Amino acid sequence: MNWLIEFFGSAEYWSGDDAIPLRLLQHLEYSFLAFAVAALIAIPLGLLIGHTGRGAVIVVVSANAARALPTLGLLVLVVLLIGVGTLWPVLIPLIALAIPPILVNTYEGIRGADPDLRDAAYGMGLRGSQVLFRALLPVALPLILLGLRLSAITVVATATVAAYVGLGGLGRYIIDGLATKNYAEVFGGAVLVVLLALAVQTGFTLLNRVIVSPGVRQVR
């Protein structure tokens, strides 16, 4: 508790280059860019593979990669290949980390839809993309949102690695605090990351209640 008071009660963390609002905005920028790119890649791919059944090996490889990907090691590798000075050394590992949960859950949501629903949609005269978007997608939406939520929380928690390559974000407090043995700063930075992850969790819970059909939500 004393560390929290020392960190959040200090004026130096509310103004200047090390201000909490500035670090928070930087962290959100890295996280949002990586999450948005991952979603733009993974959702269409998951819908396509889930609907056609072709290319399922991509999903398996993606799921295995999610368990084995060394984010910090990939960050160092990208830095060695392209150097620092841009956001790419941070974005590439975060995107690679964010894609698997979205891709796997989108695929499972579409592929796991009730076969009778699919047959009924075709029986009503719907074809191809109409079956996917009008019949299967609404049913798969809870699983897709789950994948998006897991991905977003993972990205928010992992975006602290930006500090390793001299960028900002909330990880700056953790890295700088460890370097100077300022444990109040380390603790404060970690608390901010946890609070941001909880805010993302809450946001997706509310989004699920707004956009998912009540009937589908009850079945799930």
Image (cartoon, rainbow, N blue to C red):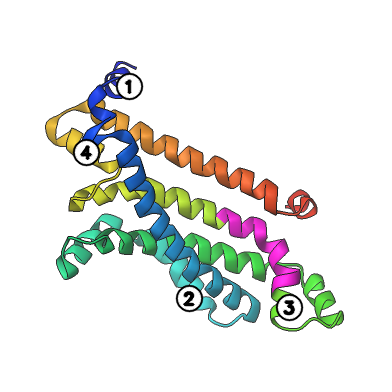
64 left or right of 93 in image: right
- The amino acid sitting under disc 3 is Gln
* SS for dot 1: helix
* SS for dot 3: helix
Q: Which residue is mark 2?
A: 58
- Using the numbered discs, state the Cα–Cα distance from disc 4 to disc 1 in whole angstroms: 20 Å
Q: Position of residue 171 (x, y in %)?
A: 27, 42
- Sequence-wise, which precedes: disc 3 or disc 4? 4
Q: For the residues carrying marks 1 and 2, which lies nearer the camera in this image?
A: 1
Q: Which residues are magenta?
A: 133-146
Q: For the residues carrying marks 4 and 2, which lies nearer the camera in this image?
A: 4
* SS for dot 2: helix
User: Would you say residue 99 is visible in this rendering?
Assistant: no
Relative height, residue 125 to residue 153 (above, below): below
- Using the numbered discs, state the Cα–Cα distance from disc 1 to disc 2 in whole angstroms: 45 Å
> CB of mark 1 within 8 Å of CB of mark 2?
no
Q: Which residue is mark 3?
A: 130
- The amino acid sitting under disc 1 is Leu
Q: Residues within 10 Å of mark 3 (few under 14, many from 20)?
A: some
Q: Which residue is mark 1?
A: 4
What residue is rendered at 76% in x and 68% in y? 114
- Using the numbered discs, state the Cα–Cα distance from disc 4 to disc 2 in whole angstroms: 43 Å
Relative height, residue 1 to residue 215 (above, below): above
Q: Which residue is mark 4?
A: 17
> CB of mark 4 within 8 Å of CB of mark 1?
no
